[in-house]
Image (cartoon, grey):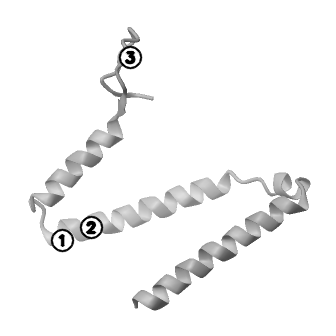
Amino acid sequence: VVGAGRSDAGDGRPRVPWFVLGFLGAVAVRSAGLLDGAVLSGGDRLATGLLAAGMFALGTTVHLRTLTRGTGRLLVLAAASTVVAAGVSLSLVSVLL
């Protein structure tokens, strides 16, 4: 893991990944109100697109042959967790809207 405070000497200091520092910087800039609404809207669209791309990439690493070779319990667990996640999401959307 590449991070701030990286030490090859093994001095025992905890390593902080660079993305954590970037996230804290983004929080500070957003909290200070330095960005225009149009920039924030564009950033929101970009974040949504990047999240969708990441989820797609994660999905492409699932091999269906591995799932079908596994036990039936694995498929039942995958189906049940999908149903629960979809149900909770739809319930929250209907309650909040």
Q: Residue at x 41, y 11 (%)?
A: 10
Q: Nearer the viewer, residue 96 or 19?
A: 96
Q: Which mark is residue 84?
A: none
Cα–Cα span, label 1 and label 2: 6 Å
Determine which quarter of the picture holds residue 2: top left
Q: Quadrant of the N terminus?
A: top left
Q: What is the count of numbered marks? A: 3
Determine which quarter of the picture holds residue 75: bottom right
Q: Amino acid at mark 3?
A: Gly
Check if mark 1's residue and mark 2's residue have beta carbons within 8 Å.
yes
Kindly identify which residue carries mark 3.
12
Q: Residues within 10 Å of mark 2 (few under 14, many from 20)?
A: few
Q: Amino acid at mark 2?
A: Gly
Kindly identify which residue carries mark 1.
38
Q: Nearer the viewer, mark 1 or mark 3?
A: 3
Cα–Cα span, label 3 and label 2: 41 Å
Q: Residue at x 33, y 36 (%)?
A: 18
Q: Nearer the viewer, mark 3 or mark 2?
A: 3
Q: Residue furthest top?
A: 9
Q: Which mark is residue 42?
A: 2
